[in-house]
Amino acid sequence: MAEKHFKYVILGGGVAAGYAAREFVKLGLKAGELAIISKEAVAPYERPALSKGYLFPEGAARLPGFHVCVGSGGERLLPEWYKEKGIELILSTEIVKVDLASKILISAAKTTFTYEILLIATGSTVIRLSDFGVQGADAKYIFYLRDLDDADHLVEAIKVKEGGKAVIVGGGYIGLELGAAMRINDYDVTMVYPEPWCMPRLFTAGLAAFYEGYYATKGIKIVKGTVAAGFDTDANEDVCSVRLKDGRVLDADIVIVGVGGRPLTALFKGQVEEERGGIKTDGFFRTSVPGVYAIGDVATFPLKLYNEMRRVEHVDHARKSAEQAVKHIKETEGGEAVEEYDYLPYFYSRAFDLSWQFYGDNVGETVLFGDNNPESPKPKFGTYWIKDGKVVGAFLEGGTPEENKALAKIARIQPPVESTDLLIKDGIGFACKF
C-alpha cells in the first residue's frame, strides 16, 4: 500500500481549498508541505460560475477562466500555480476512510495519506429525488448541478434537446438561476416548487412576487404548492414527462432538480463533534479533534454578530473561513495573531438582467421600498428587516456597488429605526446615511 505524508492536507478541492492554498502561500509555505486531495479532475474553481455563466449559449464561462481566486478579484490560480508553489494537487482521488485519531486518510485506490494538520473542506452534495424513492428519478435527461461534470453533461443535453421543454424542480437559488439559464437557451421553461413562493428561506412574499412576476414576463411558467411525484420515460428511456403530486402532468425533454444540498460529513461520523448538521468548530475553525479544522459548507461555527452557532452554505463564507483557518494555523506556528471569525452573512444572485445582494439576518418585521414592478425597464427596490427596533438585515435589487456597501454597513452596525414609514420613504437612502 503506497503511503504519502504531508505537513498540511486539505481534503476537498472546491472554493475553500483554493482560497486556503493561496493563504498558505501568502503566509509562508515550503515546497512539499501542502497537498489538496480532490475527487474532481480539475484544480479548484469558482463554483457559482456553473449556474451563472457556464450554461450561457454565447460567451459562456469555461475553464481556465474561472479558477479560484478570480471570483473575489484575485489572481487566477491555474494548475501550474500549485506546481510552482510546491503544492501537490492530488486530483481524481476519492478518500473512502478517515482515521482522525491516527491522522490517516485512505483512498479508493488504497493509497494512504498521513498528515500533521488536516483541513476538512469536503463541501456539500446535492439532495437527489431518488433519495426519497421518487419513481423514475434515475431516468436519462434528469440533471443536478454541483460540479463541472454535471455542468458539461447539462450543456451537451441542451444541444441535443435544443429548444425543447425544461422542467425545473425547486424554487430556491439554483432553481431560479437555472430557470433563467434554460430560458436564455430558448427552452420552454416550467418551474415547480412546494412552497407558497420562491426562495422562501430568504425572500418575503413581497420580494418573491416581483421575481415570479419578472420570470412570467420572460415566458417562464411557475407551478407552486406541489412536488414531483414521478417521471415517465419514452422508448429511449429519456424522461418525457413529470407527474406532480396534485395530479398534473408536465411534458419535459430536460428536468433539472435543485432541491438543496447536504454537507459531506459521513467520513467523520463518530470521530468529531457535530452540531446543526455540520462539524462543530470554534471561531478559528478548529474542531474537537486537535490538528483538525473544518471550513466552508461543512462547518458549524459561532456567528459572533448574533451570538449563535450556524452553518452557512455560500461561496463568500467558503472563501473567508478558509483564510481564517489558515491564519490561525500560522499563528500557532509563531505567526501574527488573528481575531475570532466575525462573519456578516451575505448572499447574492444574478439572473437575466437582475442582480441582488442581501446582508445580515432575515428575521423580524419587514418593509418593502422602491420600484418593484416586474415590467419596469429598470426595477430597483429592497427590503429591510427590523428586530427590536433595529435594522438587522437588508436586501437590494439593482443596487450600485456603493449602495451595496451601504447595505453591508447597516447590517453590521444595526442602526435603530424610529419609524418604518421613514424606511419606506427613504429607501436605500436610509442605508447611505451611515
Image (spheres, helix red, strand yellow):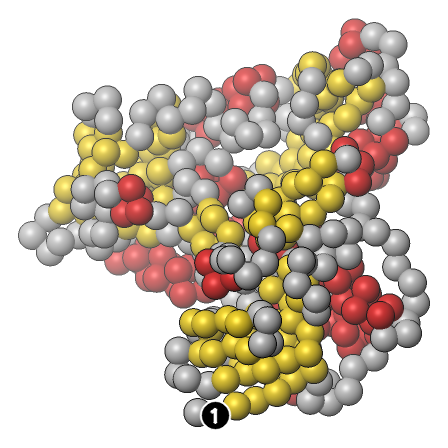
- Give residue 339's position: percent from left, percent from top: 88, 54
Identify which residue is drawn at 33% across, 52% down: 143
**Residue 21 seen in this snapshot:** yes
Indicate left or right for 312 with 433 as reference. left
The correct choice, above or below, for 2 with respect to 130 in the image is below
**Residue 36 seen in this snapshot:** no
The number of numbered discs placed on residues in the rendered structure image is 1
Q: Which amino acid, by three-letter code, is at mark 1? A: Ala
Circle 1 SS class: loop
Identify which residue is drawn at 62% across, 20% down: 372
Q: Nearer the viewer, residue 110 or 234?
A: 110
**The N terminus sits in image quarter:** bottom left
Identify which residue is drawn at 78% across, 77% down: 25
Indicate left or right for 251 with 267 as reference. left
Indicate left or right for 409 with 180 as reference. right
The correct choice, above or below, for 36 with respect to 268 in the image is below
The correct choice, above or below, for 259 with respect to 194 in the image is below
**Mark 1 packing: few (<14 Cα in 10 Å), some, or many (20+)?**
few
- Give residue 19's position: percent from left, percent from top: 70, 66
Identify which residue is drawn at 20% across, 33% down: 243
Residue tagged 1:
2
**The C terminus sits in image quarter:** top right
- Give residue 195's position: percent from left, percent from top: 42, 24
